[in-house]
Image: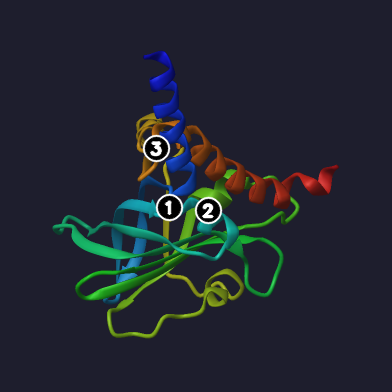
């Protein structure tokens, strides 16, 4: 009986190894801040669900976008549903550094935002990876360039991941989960994400010190 079970287990492993599948990751992000809309300064509250359906494809191409869904609340109005993409630490345009680029669309507006991660002489890593500069536009407006935000300072919204609030940080860390991933590959998928993101950040801030 033990021999039969061993053969069955070996067969299952072979089938699993021979069947290609996409292993993914998801997490939540919440940001608050201010931005101009319709000529007025508004409070902004983003609640986002970020999905990376294929962690290997994402790792192979830094500009490969993750999928984003969620909501944005302007002032005390009801939240508007949104959808879009997020590039996580893609090469920055026209200069050294990396960018996180959010392209989000709702019923009557669209939002482009960027976080620039770059070694500019001061260790401001926390601000770089938690502060999003962007612009709210009518839904039919053309997307501005990322360079206009990170190079030319043409942004009118600033929102932050509130890293100083323990409840926000704990909710963010607790939200990480895998998608379509066998149990024995869960640690590897999370390692790939951490290794890729932290490796990119280290490349900007630490290697110059060695």
Residue 190 drawn at (x, y percent) = 49, 38
**Which residue is the site of mark 3?**
182
Please tell me which of labels 2 and 1 falls first in the chain.
Answer: 1
Name the residue at 59% across, 59% down: 60
Q: Secondary structure at mark 2?
A: helix
Name the residue at 71% across, 65% down: 96
| Distance of label 1 from label 3 (alpha carbons) | 10 Å
Horizontal arrangement in the rendering, residue 68 relative to residue 146 (left or right): left
Horizontal arrangement in the rendering, residue 89 relative to residue 3 (left or right): right
What number is the disc on residue 56? Answer: 2
Residue 147 can be seen in this image: yes
| Distance of label 3 from label 2 (alpha carbons) | 15 Å
Q: Quadrant of residue 33?
A: bottom left
Above or below 93: residue 83:
above
| Distance of label 2 from label 1 (alpha carbons) | 8 Å
Residue 75 drawn at (x, y percent) = 22, 58
Residue pushed farthest top?
2
**In this view of the protein, which residue sits in the foreground, 55 or 123?**
55
For the residues bearing labels 3 and 2, Cβ distance under 8 angstroms: no
């Amino acid at each position: 009986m033990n021999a039969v079970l061993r053969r069955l287990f070996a067969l299952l492993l072979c089938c699993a190894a021979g069947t290609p599948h996409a292993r993914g990751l998801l997490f939540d992000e919440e940001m608050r801040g201010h931005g101009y809309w319709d000529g007025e300064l508004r409070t902004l509250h983003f609640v986002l669900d970020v999905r990376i359906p294929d962690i290997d494809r994402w790792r192979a191409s830094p500009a490969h976008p993750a999928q984003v869904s969620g909501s944005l609340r302007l002032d005390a109005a009801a939240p508007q549903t949104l959808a879009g993409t997020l590039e996580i630490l893609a090469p920055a345009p026209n200069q050294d550094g990396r960018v996180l680029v959010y392209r989000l669309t709702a019923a009557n507006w669209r939002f482009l935002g960027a976080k620039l991660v770059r070694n500019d002489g001061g260790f401001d890593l926390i601000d770089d990876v938690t502060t999003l500069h962007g612009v709210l536009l009518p839904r039919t407006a053309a997307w501005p360039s990322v360079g206009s935000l990170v190079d030319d300072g043409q942004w009118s919204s600033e929102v932050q991941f509130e890293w100083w609030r323990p409840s926000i940080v704990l909710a963010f860390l607790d939200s990480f989960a895998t998608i379509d991933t066998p149990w024995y590959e869960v640690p590897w998928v999370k390692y790939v994400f951490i290794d890729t993101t932290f490796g990119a950040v280290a490349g900007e801030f630490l290697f110059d010190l060695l």
